[in-house]
Image: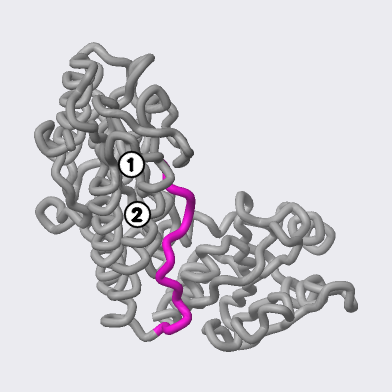
Amino acid sequence: MFATRMQSFRNRMQEAGIDVALITDDDNVYYLTGYYDYLHMEFGRPTILVVDRSGESLLITPTIDLNTALSAAHVDRISAWNDGMGEEWRSELPKAVKGAMLVGIEPDHMPPLVRAYLDTLVPVENLVSATPILAKMRMIKSTQELQLARHAGQVASAMMDAGRDAIADGVPEFEVAIATSQAGTRKAAELLTAHYDDTDMSPNTHFLQIMASGDTITKTHHRASTRIMKRGEPVFLCFCGMTNFHRFKLGFDRTFWIGEIADKQQEHIYEVAVASQAAALAELRPGVTAESVHAAYAEVIQGAGFEYPFRCGRATGYSFLEKPQLVTGDTTMLQPGMVFAVDGSVSVDTFRAQVGDSFIVTEDGWEAITDHPKSLDDVIL
């Protein structure tokens, strides 16, 4: 799989006239080589994948992670560097780019430290972005990646079920977060054991639980706190950061109420949110533009008298945000094999309702890969 991706990338480099590419985005390093869980720039340690279109692939990584690289990285050569020794990560770069007429980089994902050094080696006119090449490669998922997506959906659904069951009058939010994390980890461990050979891949869920209840419901990315939930309150659960199975990401969220809906105005707002997602899904299929899906969703929301909404959705995969996005201005034509998180959402001053699921675009429509009821009767707990 990784060898095929690397060769495809080299072919596209050839077509673009790129002699050497320097890959520094963590997700793209994994996509091309299978290398992950190394120290990142937060610790001041660059990892750089060097791809020569007709030569070797070279992974430059800290010595502290060398054993992980030797185990996981599908590359021709590894160059390990140590803090304070010689030129550190810089030592291989001069000869890697020497004589290259065009060097591909990831401008938005290259650490400033690395870019500043590269600017001393390569004239700016010889630099070009390799990001569009990799973004296009990653848009259509392989059979193996679609299996990951479906398994990620099972992990997300296990977390949602556990979160729903933990929500109750008198319960603090963090208890819900504990329940979702345990359920997601156990489901991921079950799937990893049954279907995958990488024994180093962790089943543990990632990220802090996004949830909000009561008067915090309008804080879109609020994290679970010590707040005590009460009967009649709305509760929002989002797993867009936690659904990260075998490094494959999805979006998934729901709005619930405890026992009853104390503020009856919230019923209509929620129903519009559900209808807006349904309108988007009626449009989601091959041969339509990404922005047309957003337009269908936005029309329902604005037609009900609410403000123009944020994007309807985004492609996901090995990154939380991939290309294309379901938003005004993105004219990408949808194709089978794309994976999207698709939302329905309405926000007002004192309340917001959101439902979101993930889908695979199929030959004649879509396949849902997350599943949880969303009718009003089903979300009043």
- Examine the rendered structure and indicate whether residue 49 appears above or below residue 182: below
Q: Which one is closest to the eye, mark 1 or mark 2?
A: 2
Image-based side of 56 in relation to 281, left or right: right
Tag 1–tag 2 contact (CB < 8 Å): yes
Q: Point out the tag, 1 or 2, that comes first from the N-terminus.
A: 2
Please provide the residue range marked out in magenta.
Answer: 198-210
Residue corresponding to mark 2? 180
Image-based side of 129 in relation to 176, left or right: right
Looking at the image, the residue that sits furthest to the front is 170
Image-based side of 47 in relation to 174, left or right: right
Q: Amino acid at mark 1?
A: Leu
Confirm whether residue 303 shows in the render.
no
Give how far apart the Cα atoms at labels 1 and 2 are.
10 Å
- Count up the numbered dots: 2
- Examine the rendered structure and indicate whether residue 52 appears above or below residue 152: below
Residue 216: x %, y % from top left: 42, 26
175 in magenta: no
Residue 99: x %, y % from top left: 75, 73
Residue 237 is labelled as 1
**Who's the residue at 35% across and 40% down the image?**
171
Give residue 283's quadrant in the image.
top left
